[in-house]
Amino acid sequence: MAQIDTTWEEKPIDITKEANFIWSIANKIRAAYMPDKYGDVIIPMTIIRRFECALKPTKEKVLKQFKEMPEYPAVAFYKITGYQFYNTSNFDLTELCNDPDNIAENFKSYIAGFSADVQEILKQLDMGAQIDKMNEKDCLYPVVKAFSELDLSVEHFDSIKMGYIFENLIGRFYQNVDAGQFYTGRDIIKLCVSLLLAEGCEDITEKNKIVTVIDQACGTGGMLSTAYTYLKHYNPTASVHLYGQEMMGESYAIGLAEMLIKNQNIDNFKLADTLKEDCFPDRKMRFVLENPPFGTPWGGKDAKTGQEEAVKAEYAKGEDSRWPAGLPSSGDSQLLFVQSALVKLEDNGRAAIIENGSPLFTGNTSSGESQIRKWLLENDYLEAIVAMPTDLFYNTGIATYIWILSKNKSEKRRGKVQLIDATNIYSKLRKPLGNKKNEFSPENRKQITKLYTDFSENDLSQIHDNNEFIYREYNVMQPLQRDYGITEERIQNMLQNKSVKNFYDEVKATELENSETKLNSRDSKKLAKYRNNKAAYDEMLSVLRDHISDQLWMSPEAFEPILEKILDGIIDKKLFNKVMDGLSKMDKKAEVQHDRKGNIIYDKDTSDTEIVNIDENIDDYMKKEVLPFVPDAKAFFEEDLGKKKPVIKTGAEIPFTRYFYKYQKPKSSQKLAEEIGKLEKSISQSMSELFDGE
């Protein structure tokens, strides 16, 4: 089987003229819409005109058949049009303009003549409301007139070129939405596809090969469309089946329109929330491509209705769940999409998922995020991570990464993860579009893909064992060594002990005593206890203060009989022990304390956490990193996964930027002084000009 040439690039397609012309029609609605709402009209009108142009060659035949048999099956109409849509109305945009006085009513009738799926698209885009609004503001006729004269025929605009026009228009329309939503630039998608197909995909060139691709957060379908174009280039005989799920009505509608034009099976394109359901539970996929929303909660008050319940119910299925590795924190659903993607893959499947930096390192050792990363690494699913430049997306300038996940790693990649720093591989746009100031040129994509396929280490590419990112969390403590004494400072410290406060809390007691409202049963009991204990509390403080001195005792055995004599009969043994602890301080000159069996007791107050690579011997680590500074420290590893509430001390993180950090020598003090001097001079001059002008 032939190796796929990932350097292939579509012929450059310049649709600037056409896209600018379409967008210029927005001038006709300036009195009715704010600029950020132009897309509410331009996008659906473009879709309607595109459908109309595609149906024009067969329109008369459809009308004739409909007149003869109004109940003619939809599937039969599809055979006439050659598409999975049709229109049985006598109107088209040109005809609507012949009756300006009734254009709104007739336009709605025209839309009602479309097949059900097209009507659903226009419903999601709220086209009825846009017609009414334009009609009310006297701009409906000029808009319809302008679009009726626009040629969007399939002969002049194939699905690829039309896709670029949609990309341009959508980029303008959606550049202000939340990060990660709706749209991913085609240049980014092409890089994802190149990386996916660069290895382990020779089988897709087989004659009549069936290839399945899914995007579980498909937005307007750009990722699916681009994958389709590339796959059909590499294998024109392939049967490429596209699947998508999208929860936002507007973007779903646009994506569905493009699937209709591509003559895809629209039953595979669903308006659905992936976190709530898998619309294709029995279908495994060869490829997954997706850019799930960044930082979108799946639980809590900010989650979409029903998401938290659905996610937890799915997780309860255990090994058969779509989240077999666990749940991340409820504030970010990205790692849910990662798990779901892997569950959807065939045994030789591959996925490219765009994430922000959060899934790489957030969460402590026992967190869901850490355990999901550990699962990915232990199962050898993570093939590569590519750090992309900032300012690549229309609606966010944040740092983003492509995760390449694989169930068919090549021999050389097994047990390895490749990190690629492509943050400085980009081309500047001549004119920014929203937040998008940078793009991947064909040369940029070739360079990044080559870094991936070369699979060698250099300044921009690192290769690490999976275990490089898995660690154990050790608790390091020093022997318990404390001195004991009675000073005002130690007394005040002792009074903050929880057990002492529970015995008597002066502040809380005063608050309850002076409460202006009637106390509930719980507070009444608490106040009664405080009143009962106050005398003993006051006596304890009094006798302790009577014995304040500078004397120190270097072991509990030496101090305990002294304190027992002082507090004899005032408090019970349990509280006595807490008071004694409160009067102590860490002191390395004090005696090391032992338990009854003679074992050293370690001081929990000295506890510190050490993160140690899973392959590193803890004794070697301690000798190198800890003992030179704390010679008597000891490391403890306590993990128990069998408990009802498991104790988890093994986790994973991928601190990408740390691996590519390069030290930059700070500027010299002389250079800084010169710069400060220039700034001071500039500020002084500006202030002088400001006030002299008055």
Image: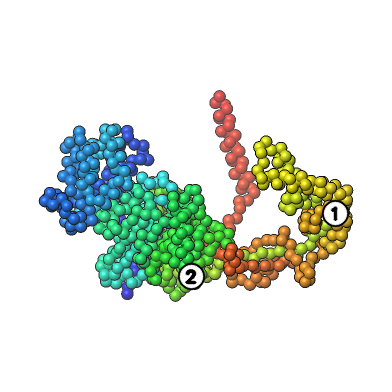
Q: Quadrant of the C terminus?
A: top right
Q: Is residue 602 above or below residue 293?
A: below
Query: Which residue: 30% across, 46% down?
Result: 123
Query: Which residue: 74% across, 47% down?
Result: 529
Q: Amino acid at mark 1?
A: Gly
Q: Amino acid at mark 2?
A: Asn
Image spot of residue 581 (x, y percent): 78, 57
Q: Classify mark 2: residues with Cα within 10 Å, few (<14), some (14-19) or many (20+).
A: few
In the shown orientation, is residue 65 left or right of residue 152?
A: left
On residue 379, the disc is 2
Q: Earlier in the sequence, mark 2 or mark 1?
A: 2
Image spot of residue 678 (x, y percent): 59, 41
For label 1, the SS is: loop
Image spot of residue 327 (x, y percent): 50, 60
Quadrant assignment, res 677: top right
Q: Classify mark 1: residues with Cα within 10 Å, few (<14), some (14-19) or many (20+).
A: few
On residue 569, the disc is 1
In the shown orientation, is residue 340 left or right of residue 58?
A: right
In the shown orientation, is residue 554 left or right of residue 302?
A: right
Judge whether residue 643 can be spotted in this image.
yes
Display coloring: rainbow
